[in-house]
Amino acid sequence: MTTTTFKMPKPAIGDVVLFSKDYKNFQNPVVGFVMKEPGDTTISILTFTQAGMAMVQDSVHHLDDPSLHGDHGWQDLGAWKFAEMTNTVRDLQPGPTSGRKTTKHQSS
């Protein structure tokens, strides 16, 4: 048995994410934007209908959160993951959580 708890990846306000009401298969995702400071386990996402109406999706858990597979009703709130574009930008940003590699030559 593992004692490790899931730690949600931390998006920033304005990050582009994908949202789906289908947390099991993540079918028919739509583009959304993180609309306010993320909580410890959920985020609020601004999405748009095909008719252009804005919708707020509150208390959305990350797709990889094992809590979604429990029986607490959170499944009805959908799930999110970073859009590929956001992953690329995050990888290019310098910092300890960045995936960016240095291109500087190191002296011996």
Image (tube, rainbow, N blue to C red):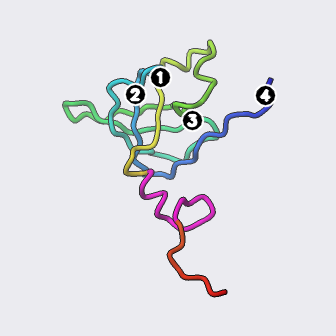
- Distance of label 1 from label 4 (alpha carbons): 23 Å
Name the amino acid, label 4. Answer: Thr
Mark 2 highlights which residue? 20
Name the amino acid, label 2. Answer: Ser
Closer to the camera: disc 4 or disc 2?
A: 4
Residue 96, position in %: x, y? 63, 63
Mark 3 highlights which residue? 42
Quarter of the image with the N terminus is: top right
Circles 1 and 4, Cβ within 8 Å, touching? The answer is no
Circles 4 and 2, Cβ within 8 Å, touching? The answer is no
Q: Earlier in the sequence, mark 3 or mark 1?
A: 1
Q: Earlier in the sequence, mark 3 or mark 4?
A: 4
Q: Which residues are magenta?
A: 87-100
Circle 3: element type: strand
Circle 1: element type: loop
Circle 4: element type: loop
Residue at 48% over, 23% down: 77
Closer to the camera: disc 1 or disc 4?
A: 4
- Distance of label 4 from label 2 (alpha carbons): 28 Å
Residue 7, position in %: x, y? 66, 39
Mark 4 highlights which residue? 2
